Amino acid sequence: QVQLVESGGGLVQPGGSLRLSCAASGSIFTIAAMGWYRQAPGKQRELVAEITSGGSTNYADSVKGRFTISKDSAENTKYVYVQMNSLKPEDTAVYYCTARSYVGKSSWGQGTQVTVSS
């Protein structure tokens, strides 16, 4: 079992920046990749960015050049971050942290709201 806790959401004006953080605990040795998904009202949940344990990254086309995913680790905890710059109103969504195991099982955080509005 992997537990995920997100932080860093909030309200920001268009063009602004936010940094989301996620801490993974529990069976972190099973984690092959961590990432972020988002879900806007009335829309399906979509991948924002993912980073593997080896450091390979994957971004949604809509965030390339604006968002940067990174990772870190400490004893018994893994972290994933996403630096979000040049935010647009269409980035407004609930952002979920996810961890994918080597056997394909996914764990999810509770979500954090990001609102981009003037």
Image (cartoon, rainbow, N blue to C red):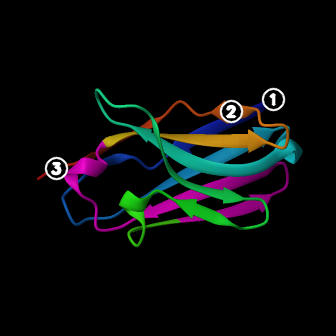
**Residue at 67% over, 54% down:** 79
At mark 3, the secondary structure is loop
Q: Give me the C-alpha separation between circle 2 and circle 3.
A: 30 Å
Farthest residue, direction front: 61
Q: Given contact means CB atoms under 8 Å apart, are the residues at marks 2 and 1 in contact?
A: yes
Which is more N-terminal, label 1 or label 2?
1
Location of mark 3 (residue) = 117
Membership of 20 in magenta stretch? no
**Residue at 54% over, 42% down:** 6
Q: Which mark lies nearer to you, 2 or 3?
A: 2
Question: How far across and down, in percent of the image, does residue 83 sit?
Answer: 46, 64
**Count of all numbered marks drawn on residues in the image:** 3
Q: Nearer the viewer, residue 101 or 84?
A: 101
Mark 3: amino acid:
Ser
Location of mark 2 (residue) = 107
What stretch of residues is rendered in magenta? 69-92
Location of mark 1 (residue) = 1
Mark 2 Cα shell of 10 Å, populated few (<14), some (14-19), many (≥20): some
Membership of 75 in magenta stretch? yes
Mark 1: amino acid:
Gln
**Residue at 40% over, 31% down:** 44
104 vs 51: above or below: above
Question: How far across and down, in percent of the image, does residue 29 sit?
Answer: 88, 46
Q: Give me the C-alpha separation between circle 1 and circle 3.
A: 37 Å
